[in-house]
Image (cartoon, grey):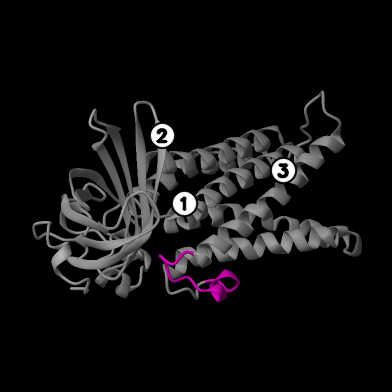
Amino acid sequence: MTLWYLARGSGLVLLAVLTVNLVMGIAIQGGWHPESWPRFAVQAVHRNLALLAVVLLTIHVVTIELDPFVPVGWWAALVPFVSPYRPFWLGLGTLSLDLMAAVVVTSLLRSHLRPRWWRVIHWLTYVSWPVAVLHSLGTGTDTKLTWVFGFELGCVGLVATTVIFRVARATRPRVAVRGVIMAAVAATPMAVLAWSAAGPLQSGWARQAGTPTTALASGAPASTGAGGQASLPAPFTARFVGSATSSAGGNGETITISGQVQGGVGGQLLVSLSASQLPDGTIAVDQGSVTYRPAPGSLVYTGRVVSVGPGSLIMRLAAGGGQSEPAELTISGPVPASSVSGLFYFGSAPAGGAGQDGGQDS
């Protein structure tokens, strides 16, 4: 789960850096720079933002490749449209990467290139940005989150506004042509909004985008069923291996159980329990939250702990507004501990059978 969050987080921050850098580039080309800043300082910020984008891009690519939830493949990081996972939309990301790489390499070799050739290649920056935006909208598994989509649409709006001001202040081409360009650019955010509403924001986009059939058939929550609710994995019982840590806070402590689900549809499980100490010295669990991400999957199952027994946690989990499902985690041995193991049960049948299956996948 850490890799997934790092991959998505670095991707969104990368989009922000690319957007700011593009806006600066457009403004600099129009002769803008803060009066209190020397021109070389503005250029330095512009270059350093480009270098930061390269670092973020590296983190984004590496974490995606290491993340076991989606089958991307290292070759797909260099060659567009060859990944088995959402090939077109992920391929746009690879294409954007290749365009950025061309700009970076030629910038490093600028002294060996003719200025005209360097300027032509540098214009690829203006191509790589919209390609990266489409990649983020089409591939991102959290595009449906309001704040994520709002952020992406805000990036589009910021660039569109900058381009409009730049064209408005230009002396060429003629006024009529500039008016047409500004009108077309102003309509871009609305066009992106309309396309997103008909595509990435729709139920079933995972299948349309090219999520592998094996991932959908495995029951991972990458697809959606009737009425827009998330499809649920088939009931399964699997081995759980992880750790349990404890931290003091307030009048009690927080117990965190995290680890791998080894079997069924696999994935990662995180349980956070708020506990308090009773007068007799025993520990009572007051409340608990659960996050479960099957592998591979595009939705996260979240829920709460509804009851706690000796070595057993009964939970209710749901994803993407879908129906709630029971789950159970049984752990053998003391908690907290640096290493814990047990069984994880997920399914529509009444919970409580996890400890009776011998750990075999259903």
Q: Position of residue 81 (x, y in %)?
A: 50, 72
Q: Main secondary structure of the magenta part?
A: loop
Q: Residue 177, image x and y in percent?
A: 62, 42
Q: Quadrant of the N terminus?
A: bottom left
Residue 70 within the segment the image draws in magenta? yes
Q: Which residues are magenta?
A: 67-80
Left or right? Give the position of 191 relative to 255. right
In-image side of 151 versus 315 (left or right): right
The answer to whether any part of residue 187 appears in the image is no
| Alpha carbons under labels 2 and 3: distance apart | 50 Å
In the image, what residue occupies the spot 26% across and 57% down? 331
> Marks 1 and 3, how far apart in space?
30 Å
Q: State the residue position of label 1.
A: 5
Q: Amino acid at mark 2?
A: Ala
Q: Earlier in the sequence, mark 1 or mark 2?
A: 1
Tell me which numbered mark, 1 or 3, is placed earlier along the sequence: 1
Q: How many marks?
A: 3
User: Which residue does the image show at 29% across and 36% down from the upper left?
Assistant: 275
| Residue where numbered disc 3 is placed | 25
* Residue 72 locus on image (x, y percent): 47, 70
- Provide the residue designation for mark 2: 248
Location of residue 206 in the rendering, given as x and y in whole percent from the top left corner? 33, 62
The quarter of the picture where the C terminus appears is: bottom left
Secondary structure of the residue carrying tag 3 is helix
Task: Indicate the amino acid at tag 1.
Answer: Tyr
Amino acid type of the residue that numbered disc 3 sits on in the rendered structure = Gly
The front one of 189 and 345 is: 345
- The stretch drawn in magenta includes residue 82: no
Instruction: Provide the secondary structure element on which disc 1 rests.
Output: helix
Rounded to the nearest whole Å, what is the CA distance between mark 1 and mark 2?
Answer: 26 Å
Q: Nearer the viewer, residue 157 or 217?
A: 217
